[in-house]
Image: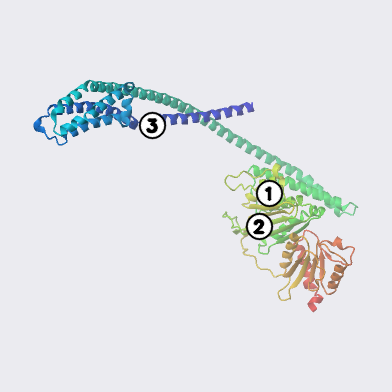
Amino acid sequence: MLKGHNWLSRFKQWMMYGFIVLIIVITIALFGIITYTSDSAKQNSRRVFESALWNALQLQVQTYRLLNYLVLLKAPDLPLNGQAYFEYDLLMSRIDLLRDGEVGTLVREFEGGRTTRLLNIMNGELELLSFHISKLEEGDLSYLPSLIDRIQKLDPQLNEFVGLVNNGSNAFINNQHQILQSKLHYIQLLSIALLLCLLCLCFFMAKSFSQLKFAHERNKQLKADMQNSRSDKADLLGFINQQVRPPINAILGTAKTLNQSSQKVPEALTKHIEESGQQLLHTIEMLSDLSLLEAQKLSLQPTTDDLKAQMEAFVELTEAQMSRKNLACALYIDPALPDSIHLDFGRFKEIVLALLQNAIAHCPAGSISIQLRPSALAAPTVLLPDGTYETRVMQLAIRDTGLGMPNNLQQSLRVNPNLPNQKDSPDANTVGLDLALCHKLIYLMKGEMHFSCVENEGCEFWIDLPFYIPAGQGFPIPKEPIMPSSQSQKTALILEQDMNLAKIIELQLTSSNIKVSLAQEDDGHSSFDQYDLILLGKFSGLDSHLEERLLDCIKTGTTLWSYQSLDFRHTSLDPKALSFPLTQRKLSPLIKALFLDQPTQKDSK
């Protein structure tokens, strides 16, 4: 039934197009005929007709005038002084007017060419009279009777010619009248057809407007029904969330109790139960928020809290997943950001976790770097919440060294619903639950999403989010670095092939007033004695020679750290083990213990 309805709609559409084309064709034909039968064309035909008849009569009159002149000519009138030539030339000019131009063309068509033959005969006879005229001009009147006689003999032919021209002119004008009448008839028919088409078009337009109004009302009703359905779904998910959360919390509490009890319960099992429960709770929260967003019922609930502590806690929630895939992760928070900000941290957590889950999913091996820094974008003009005095923008940058995202997923995420002529945010079936909610939340919080992906090299996301500065807190006060400026600046070397990870660790150490050098591999001859700290990451070329050089620099007071401690279990090296994710909160006490509490041999030197 729906298929038949679509066919009928297409038929109506093509019929409407056909009527429009027909109206255009009829209008063009109508105006073409009107233009063709315009006053200028009629005036031209009438002028030619009147000229033919007038010139024929003038030929007759001028012949009689010449004849009268010759009859009245006497000996006392001599010499003529060209008067005879003048009268003769005037008569011959009438012959020329009837033979040339549009008048000649029209005259030749009269009476099947009879007029042309008569005109040629008269022209020949008059041409022969030129000799007699010349004699008269010389004063010889003996040729005058012969001249008068020959002109009088032309009278029957002249009368016949004028009669033929008169009859032909009448026939011509009658024919033109019939042509104009037929064209007028065509104009009337085309006008009637145009009027009928316009009436049909008006009928179809009225019908279309009626259907459009019905479709608009139906669409409005469907939108209302859809909104009610979304509201019902949001209420249902909220009810499910309320009912499911207590038993899940009970399971999590049981797992934590078993982990802390003296009973021999595998620690991995309790951690897995706890992690799965947390993921289930997070999924339920995402479903609830997504349904609230679709129902346009989700409202932001900003609170004032410590940005650095919250951000590090969000990243540490994915520690178990990264550990299972052996992924390295480092977080750097720019000290230029305020300590406490006013933000909906619950929604910010969902954005961070969604982007981290996406990075983990597309990164089978490698590293994930996270930066939180001030954004270069101008803060949006919004109404400030109570207890705040300024709006700023921060940028969350997450980069992985994985496989990159598929092209269809990238195209779906490039949609900006705040721009005109843009479709809505991608749905969960296209990009997944995490990214669908993340995309909607970013633009709900007046933020922006940008990303870049390279196949087999990974992706980088840039999320710009506005936040509010609580009242009483201005620009962040510059903190005293862990290494005071009064002491000599410490140096550190990072041996790491993954520059994505190494650059974040460099930023972390640089914020503590430590001069950092990066190296992707050991060149085999450089001395390590100049460094106070060597951080051993993932690199090639660990041999006995390098081990011996590292042991020598340890004797001079150099400290070794490593987040790849398992790679050194069969060596004499015993570096300080670091765990992922690397955060400034984890590194700060280690740096204090190294460079403040325990003076090294390098300091004494």
Quadrant containing the C terminus is: bottom right
Going by the image, does 150 lie left or right of 8?
Answer: left
Circle 3: residue type:
Thr
Residue 409 vertical placement versus 69 (above, below): below
Q: Do the residues labelled 1 and 2 touch (CB within 8 Å)?
A: no
**So how many labels did they put on this image?**
3
Amino acid on which the number 1 mark rests in the picture: Cys
Secondary structure, mark 3, is helix
| Precedes in sequence: disc 3 or disc 2 | 3
x and y percentages locating residue 600 in the rendered image: 81, 75
**Residue 258 seen in render:** no
* Residue 577 or residue 544, whichever sits in front: 544
Judge from the rendering whether residue 193 lies leftward or rightward of residue 78; answer left or right: right
Q: Earlier in the sequence, mark 1 or mark 2?
A: 2
Name the residue located 89 percent from the left edge and 65 percent from the top edge.
571
Q: Which of marks 3 and 2 is in front?
A: 3
Q: Distance between the residues labelled 1 and 2?
A: 15 Å
Which of the numbered marks, if any, corresponds to residue 35? 3
Kindly report which numbered mark, 3 or 1, lies closer to the viewer in this rendering. Answer: 3
Disc 2: which residue = 395
Q: Which residue is rendered at x = 20% and y = 27% of the image?
A: 63
Nearer the observer, 66 or 305: 66
Badge 3 or badge 1: first in the primary sequence? 3
Disc 3 + disc 1, Cβ < 8 Å: no
Is any part of residue 22 visible from this angle?
yes
Q: Is mark 2 on a helix, strand or loop?
A: strand
Q: Residue at x 66, y 46 (%)?
A: 411
Label 2 amino acid? Gln
Question: Gap between marks 3 and 1, in whole Å?
Answer: 67 Å
* Residue on which the image places disc 1: 438
Image position, residue 83 (x, y; %): 16, 34
What is the distance, in whole Å, between disc 3 and disc 2 at their CAs? 70 Å
